[in-house]
Image (cartoon, rainbow, N blue to C red):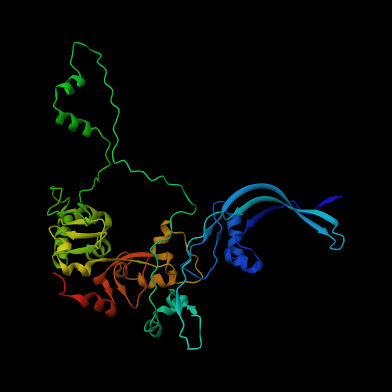
Amino acid sequence: MNISVCSLQPVYTVQHPCNVKNSERAIETLGGQSRIIDVFQHSTSQLTCSFTPTNIYERSLRSERRKITGLLIRVKRKKSKKSITSVEVVGVLDTKFTFDTLADFQYLPMTRKQQTADDSAPEYESFLKRITLTRQCLEKENLEKPCPLMCIPAIFSRFFEPTDYAFRPEPKTRRRIITTTNKYPNHANKSDDMATKSDKEKDDTVASKLTKPIARTSCAHHVYFDTEQVPTASKSISAPYTKAEHNTIERLRRLFDQRPIWTRASLLYNLRVTEVVLKRIIHHVAYFCCNGPWNRCWVKYGYDPRTDSKSKIYQIVDYRVRSILDPEKKVVQSRTNRAYHRSSLIPNHILRSFTQNSREYLEETFVFKRTSLPLARSIHYQLCDIQLDDVQKMIHSNDGQFA
């Protein structure tokens, strides 16, 4: 039988993880025809598969791109005799996409329907459209509508494939092998000095030669939540660099006298300085919290928020947005710098209205209001900067009940 060659154009194959019965639905789970063509044209792009494309709380599967060698052949045969009538080559296989990763948990916000006495099994419905961030969110009638509580994990799993992990104690330090040779017999060497030292001095000498983690080089104090005592003064005793920075430090001290805990964004907004200037002077006034309820906050020297119940209003809320305001805009990757830029969340024509008067110092960078949208995908808000009556009422509901 002769095999005819119809075409020798390169062919891309996609091994779908599901049993495909509807090709249109299968293409929709891969991002649509335009997304598939874009992945084929760019060698660094990854093809993803989403079982529920409209759900923003779902983690898509990622494919593996592999180069293959083969031919795509179209075979025709008769059903009655099961004999092959014609064979032709349609194309040359070039690249193959396979989904070998595990499917993570798929979170879909559901609420239970009101049932009658005749209903036996409970029924649920999705309220995804009510909590997705869209243009209609700022309308007053939509803001006043009650919405069920939706609590999901902060992040999904960081791994796409199962990995083997051997449980063993993590070594904090390791000893270095030190060899000494005496090239000059008439002179004493380091080994002789070690022989004359006491046991305690020997242990101290060996301990000093152990590898240690690299210490922070910043002048600021970095305090953890389990630290016993908070610092009362700065590490550096040097004077400010310039007279202008000295005046900025005085303004900074007045801000911490009004409020003992601030975030970096709120300080930049009130001081109207650059991040470089703030970084050079902040360690003269406050220390930095590395974790805990006041994570990533600057606290006034000598003030311990753990011992003061009034400091609860300065706790941090990590607010993250999984959707975008413009439905036509593609969601960028979370590992890129643009993912945390304000322009990746808000369209340009709306962003210009925010930044007409002040482009760098925006109150929306640290204050949450009912009539405004967050300017980035991830923002740290202090509880006192969330200007919602219901939230503030909840925060102050237990005032005076704790010492």
Position of 72 relative to 55 (above/below): above
In this view of the protein, which residue sits in the foreground, 89 or 251?
89
The residue drawn where x is 86% and y is 50% is 2
User: In the rendering, at what x and y percent does residue 226 appear?
Assistant: 21, 55
In this rendering, the count of numbered labels is 0
Q: Quadrant of the C terminus?
A: bottom left
User: In the rendering, at what x and y percent does residue 170 appear?
Assistant: 33, 43
Q: Quadrant of residue 394?
A: bottom left
Q: Quadrant of residue 284?
A: bottom left
Most extreme residue toward the bottom, as rendered? 117
In this view of the protein, which residue sits in the foreground, 268 or 212?
212
User: In the rendering, at what x and y percent does residue 197 appear?
Assistant: 14, 25
In this view of the protein, which residue sits in the foreground, 45 or 149?
149
Q: Quadrant of residue 399?
A: bottom left
The residue drawn where x is 24% and y is 54% is 279
Left or right of 124 in this view: 1:
right
Left or right of 146 in this view: 236:
left
The residue drawn where x is 39% and y is 78% is 148
User: In the rendering, at what x and y percent does residue 308 appear?
Assistant: 15, 66
Left or right of 36 in this view: 402:
left
Left or right of 364 in this view: 35:
right
The residue drawn where x is 20% and y is 48% is 219
